[in-house]
Amino acid sequence: MSTLESELLEHPFLAGLDPSMAARLASLTQRVEFPAGAWIARVGMPADQFLMVTDGRAGIEIAAADMNPLIVTTVHPGEVLGWSWFVEPHEWQFDVVALSELTALAIDAKELLRACAADHELGYQIGTRLIRVVASRLGAARYQLMDVYGSAR
């Protein structure tokens, strides 16, 4: 088993994934690093990678008219960045900034989509895990917006 396979299987997002699927994902994965303050993604940019955070923190931001950008959630080690690669138009829906030095396992999104289409069980496993992320992020955004607009009254 390669180091990347081991790291993928140890990441909470892939907990319980069949090792043969992790081997397939490892072939699509590379380790990436971002310095503190770097933009990892900007709204409208192509969502061409899926990031599994292993070290550091990132802030997911939204910009509202006439307001400063708002961090709706903070992503920590063991969490993931990006679901926009999974749905058309495959563009980032939020801005993401590294709040500290950040290290992640980056999976090539186009190749991951191809792998999910070719192996429906892999697609199901990734899709069900991603919907949990989307639901969590939607909940975080809701609470953050209630906080902001509740205090603006």
Image (cartoon, helix red, strand yellow):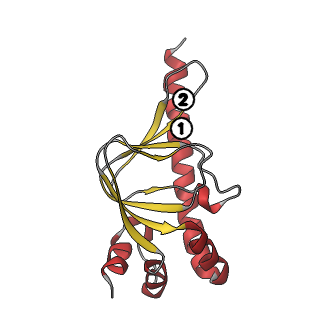
Quickly name the residue at label 1. Answer: 141
Rendered location of residue 92, percent (x, y): 59, 49
Quickly name the residue at label 2. Answer: 145
Classify residue 138 as left or right of residue 18.
Answer: right
Q: Are marks 1 and 2 in contact (CB under 8 Å)?
A: yes
122 versus 52 height, above or below = below
Please identify the residue farthest to the top as the structure is shown: 153
Classify residue 80 as left or right of residue 127.
Answer: left
Q: How many marks?
A: 2
Q: CA distance from mark 1 to mark 2?
A: 6 Å
* SS for dot 1: helix
- Work out which quarter of the rendered image holds the N terminus and state it: bottom left
Residue found 49% across the figure and 83% down from its top: 24
68 versus 44 height, above or below = above
Rendered location of residue 73, percent (x, y): 44, 41
Classify residue 134 as left or right of residue 1.
Answer: right
* Amino acid type of the residue that numbered disc 2 sits on in the rendered structure: Leu
Q: Nearer the viewer, residue 136 or 92?
A: 92
| Picture disc at residue 68 | none
21 versus 39 height, above or below = below
